[in-house]
Each structure stands twice: as C-alpha cells, then as structure tokens.
Amino acid sequence: MRSRLRIPCFVLAVLVAFIPTSGFAQSTAYKPGAPVFMWKVSSKTNSAFLLGSVHLGDKSLYPLPSVIEDAFAVSSVLIVEVDTTKVDREQMKQIMLSLGNYPEGDGLFKHISPETRAKLETFLGGYDIPVEAFAQYRPWMVGLTVTMLPLMKAGLNPGDGVDMYFLGRAGNKHVEQLEDAEQQIRLLAQFPETASDSNLSRCITQAASTNERYASIASLWSQGAADKLDKLMESWSVDEGKEEKAFSHRIREERNPPMTGRLEKCLQSSLEKCFMVVGAAHVVGSEGILKQLQAHGYHVEQATEVLGAAAPK
C-alpha cells in the first residue's frame, strides 16, 4: 500500500499527492536562503523535524537539499505514515480485492451512469485497456487506477518517493509507522457509494490534465511555498458535494491530530531526535500539523537551504 496506495482523484491531493513531474526538483533549484518543505519544531527540552513528503517521484528529485539531509543525519528516529518495507504485499493484495471488488452478481456498471461508462471506455481506450477489465471494481478502485495511469506512463513511481528514500537509508535509526497499510486501504474503501458516479466522472475528466496540474503543485513544493500550495489544493475541492467534502475531511484533517501527537511525544522527551515524514497535505492548512503545533505553544521555523552548512543542532 502506498507502495503506497493512492486514492481517487478528488482527494488525491488531500491525502498524498504532491506529485512531481519529470525534472521536478533538482538540487540546482535550491539556492542558499531558499525555503524548503521542512520545518524545525522546538520545545523547551528538544527539537524535531517535520518534512512534507511527495510519495511519487523520479530520479531527478535527488539529491535533496542539504538542509534536509543534515536534519535526517542528526535524527535517531524516523517516523513515516506507513513503513512500506514491512508490508506483506500478498496480504494487501487480498484485502484490496475483498474491499475493492463487487461480489459475484454485482458490478461497476450497475453503479455508474451510461455517460460515465462511456467516458471511462474512451479514457481506457487510450491505454489499450478494455473497459470490461474493470467490470468487478468498485468506483473508488477505478478512480484510483484512472488517476494513476497518466502518472505511471510519465515514469513516476513510489520507489523514488521521499518516504521510500529515507526508509532505504534508515540504517540503525528506529523506524516507526503512524498507521498501517490495511488501515489506509479500509479508510479508502469507506468512500460513499452515493457519490461514486460523480467522483469517477470527475477523475476521468481530470486525468487528461494530471501532469499539468501536478507540475504546478511540484513547483510550489520545490519552492517551499506552503501557503500557496494549500490554497491551490483547496481550490480543487470547490465542486465537491457534501459527501465528498466529508470524506476529504476524514482522509486529511481527521488524521492530523495523531500525527501531531506523535511529534509532541518527541518534543516532550529529550531521549529521541525525531524526523517525521508525512504527506505534504497533512503539514499545511488551518487544521494541519504546523498550525496544531503552534497552537500548542511550540516554536515552528521553516528550514532554508544553506549549501555546505553544518548539520542543524
């Protein structure tokens, strides 16, 4: 999962996906004094680092800014949403099948309109995929696939995401996950059936401009422009229905407090130096982790790139 599993398009930005396009964030883009998408959070007894992640990438994402690498180097604990190195992929496949497929006698085309089916057939035709291949999938699974196809075709993959990068370099650091893969899959499967047709139709429409949409997101991420990125993300939700908005809130904001709480445990102790990596959408916003930490009295400072600088203390 989130090898990391991705959600339907209307909440893709909300949960995961500040997704880079090819050539997204090369190190030459980071100049001394430029902000990056990482914050140092301090209490009276300790400090910790919070990095907003992109979960898909390509090799052009690396090397990361030195200030991020330095923060990771001095940290003893790596906290991620899901430790994908520990996922039983066969078990996850079976869970996906049980939650993402209709039972025998039911099927996708009984739950979407003829117009949405026609749109889906046209879209899949561009990838030489017959629409019948999706006949047993629930709409949220179809929307997930529709969203991912253009990104996969562009050469983006979870293996080059920021989470996987740091998991691969954890070494002797203690690695802790905030959630598990099954928990995330079950959350996605709660998407309201009554909003499925409109959401899937929207996914198909947006898929044509996926790479262009995320190119602008990638640019803001690489600039460390948290407020602008949050505003752009919010603009995507203006046409959501009531059920969709409620689900978006459950996917994003309702998951933020436990993340904040775990970082607070680090800050209240002097025994561990934490480096937390979570989806950038969880970091920003009026109910984001940064705002919650500030409301609880912690000092929050956005990191800036200083080439050749010593590791932060």
Image (spheres, rainbow, N blue to C red):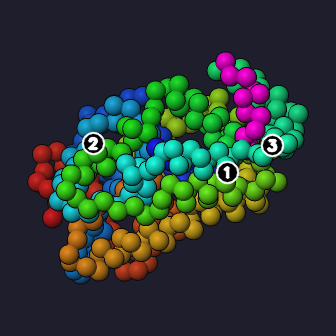
Vertical arrangement, residue 240 with respect to residue 40, above or below: above
Quarter of the view holding residue 49: bottom left
Kind of element beneath mark 2: loop
The residue tagged 1 is 99
Q: Tell whether 195 sits left or right of 191.
A: right
Residue type, mark 3 in image:
Glu
Where is residue 137 shown, x and y percent of the image?
72, 40
The first of marks 3 and 2 along the sequence is 2
The percent position of residue 189, horizontal first and vertical second, equals 67, 54
- Write down the residue under mark 3: 104
Query: Contact, CB < 8 Å: mark 1 with mark 2?
Result: no
Q: Which residues are magenta?
A: 128-139
Q: Closer to the camera, 153 or 32?
A: 153
Q: Secondary structure at mark 3?
A: loop
| Place of residue 129 in the rendered image (x, y in percent of width and height, measured from the top left) | 68, 22
Pointer 1 or 3: first along the chain = 1
Mark 1 secondary-structure assignment: helix
**Residue 45 belongs to the span the image colors magenta:** no
Q: Residue at x 77, y 27 (%)?
A: 132
Q: Position of residue 75 (x, y in %)?
A: 21, 61
Q: Identify the residue under disc 2.
A: 64
